[in-house]
Amino acid sequence: MNTELIGSIAQIVLMIVLAYPLGKYIAKVYKGEKTCLDFMAPVERFIFKVSGIDPKEEMSWKSFLKALLTINLFWFFWGMLLLYFQQYLPLNPDGNPGQSSHLSFNTCISFMVNCNLQHYSGESGLTYFTQLFVIMLFQFITAATGMAALAGVFRAMASNSARTIGNFWDLLMKSCTRILLPMALIVGFILIVQGTPMGFDGKMKLTTLEGTEQMVSQGPAAAIIPIKQLGTNGGGYFGTNSSHPLENPTYLTNMLECWSILILPMAMVFALGFYLKRKRLAYSIFGVMLFAYLVSVGINTYYEMSGNPKIAEMGIDQSAGAMEGKETRLGSAATALWSAATTATSNGSVNGMHDSTMPLSGMMEMLNMQINTWFGGVGVGLMNYYAFLIIAVFISGLMVGRTPEFLGKKVEAREMKIATIVALAHPFVILIGTAVACYYWVYDPAFVEAEGGWLNNPGFHGLSEMLYEYTSSSANNGSGFEGLGDNTYFWNLTTGLALIVSRYLPIVGQVAIAGLLAQKKYVPESAGTLKTDTATFAVMTLCVIFIVAALSFFPALTLGPIAEYFSIY
C-alpha cells in the first residue's frame, strides 16, 4: 500500500482509539467526579473568589445563556481595542501597525466566535502582544464556551425533570483548566522539540542557498498553535498556516496537528454516552459522523492523488498527485486528509491551499461545512447534530404514529420550531451572502473594482471562492479559497455579520431546546417508545441531514465546483 495512505489510516485509527478514553474523562470532569487533574481545584477556587462568582449556583437555561453572551460581549470590546491600537502596545519588535477599524472588527468577531477567519497575514497583521492576549486568549475562551454550552445540554438531557442546567462559569473554567490547557501543554512541548519557535525575538536575518538575505518571522508560535488545533480554532500564526515550515516543521508535527483537530470533537460524542449512561446512543451518533467524514476523506484523497488531467495533458508527471498549492514534504494524501478533517470540524487550519484542490475536493470541503454536523467545532458540532436529532425524532414519530419523544421527553411544536430555525438559518446566511456578493460582482463592477477586484479567478471557480467564504464564515470554520481578495469593507463587514448570527443563534436555540425539554416530566420508555439509539434511527437522521443540505446547497454547488469539474474532465 502507498506509504502516504498508511500515514492517513494511522492518523484516523489513532484518533478513534484515543477519543474513547478521553470522552470518558471529559464526562467525569463535567459530572464533578474525581479525576487526575483535581489538583487544579485551588487555582479555580482562587479565580472564582477574585471574580466574586459562586460556581455551585445552579442556572436556568436563560441565566446560562445570559452569562455566555455577556462574557462574549466583553471580549468583543477587549479585542477590538487591542487590535486597533496594537502598534502602541508592547511586544512588537517588528513594528507592525494597528489594524483598520473594519479589519479589527472582522478579526475580533472571527476569533470571538471560534471561526478565526483571517483577512490578514499573521506575521505582519498582528503583534506578539495581540497574538497572546487576543488570539490565544480567545482560542481558549471560545473553545471552552462551546464545550460549556454542550455540557449544559448534557445536564439537561440527563435530567428527569429540572429547571436548571448547571453553572456556566464552572463548566467554562473546567473546560480550560481540566481539558484544553493540559492537552495544549503536551502538544506545545512536542512542537518545540520538533523545531517550532517559542520566543519573543523579532525577525531573524538569514542567508539563503542562493546567497540572498531573507527575513524570517519568529515569536511565541509553539504556545498558540496547540490551542488553535485542539480548540478547533484554526487561525494561523503564520500567514500560510500549517503549510509554513515553522508552524508545521515535520511529518510528525503534521500528524500531531491533524490529530489535534479531531480528537476533542470525537471525544465529546463519547462523553455524551458516558454522561447519559447511554453508550449505544453515542455509538450511533459517532457512526453517522465517522461514516460521513470517511466519505469526504476518501473522495478528497482519490482526486488529490490522481492529479490534474489538464496538467497531465501538458506532459507533466502527475504520479505525486495534484501538487499545486501543496507542500512536497507532506504530499497529496496528507493534504487531502487535513482538508477533510479541518472542514468536518470548525477548525479551518490548512496545510495546503484549498483554492488549489481539485473541484470535487473543494465541493466536499464546502459540503462538510454546509452540513456542519460531522464532529464540528468543540462542543457546538454535537449541538448542531442535536438540532437534527430533534427534527428526526419529530418526523419519525409522525411516520410511525408515535408521540415524538427523545430521552423520555416529549418533543412538541415549540422545540420543533426552534430546531427548524436553527437548521435553516445556516443555509440562509450562506446563500443570501453569496447572492449579495454575486449581485455586486455582476451589476456593480465599479464598486468591486474600487475594493481591489475581489476575484483572481472568474467563472465557476470565482463563484466557488465567494460561496466558500460565506460557507466558512457561517460554519465558524475560517479557511478560505484564497484567490478571493477579502480584506475590504464589504467582505470584512458582511462576513462579520455572518459570523455573529451563525455562532450565537444556534447556541441560543440548542440550549433553549435542551432547557425546555429538561423542564418536562419524564415519560418512562414503553413498547411504543421510538428508539433513538438504533442503526435505523441513525440512518434516518443521516437522511434528514442530507436532504436539508441537498435541497439548500446543491444548486449553488452545481454552478460552482460541479460545473468546474465537468469543464476540466
Image (cartoon, rainbow, N blue to C red):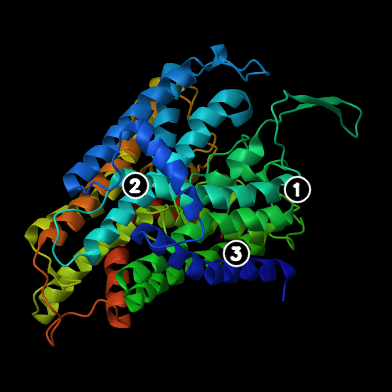
- Residue drawn 49% across and 29% down? 134
Rendered position, 505 above or below 166: above
User: How far from the left and from the top, in percent, is residue 63?
Assistant: 19, 42
Q: Which residue is mark 1?
A: 193
Earlier in the chain: of badge 3 and badge 2, it is 2
Mark 3 residue element: helix
The front one of 569 and 252 is 252
| Marker disc for residue 301 | 3
Residue 437 picture quarter = top left
- Residue drawn 17% across and 48% down? 60
Q: Nearer the viewer, mark 2 or mark 1?
A: 2
Image quarter in which the C terminus is found: bottom right
With 230 as the anchor, is 327 left or right in this view? right
Which residue type carries mark 3? Thr
Decide: marks 3, 2 in contact (CB < 8 A)? no
Q: Nearer the viewer, mark 3 or mark 2?
A: 2
With 448 as the anchor, is 158 left or right in this view? left
Rendered position, 495 above or below 463: above
Which residue type carries mark 2? Asp
Earlier in the chain: of badge 1 and badge 3, it is 1
Mark 2 residue element: helix
The front one of 372 and 317 is 372
User: How far from the left and from the top, in percent, is residue 404?
Assistant: 12, 72
Q: Which residue is mark 2?
A: 170
Residue 259 picture quarter = bottom right
Which residue type carries mark 1? Val
- Mark 2 → mark 1, Cα distance in angstroms: 34 Å
With 8 as the anchor, is 295 left or right in this view? left
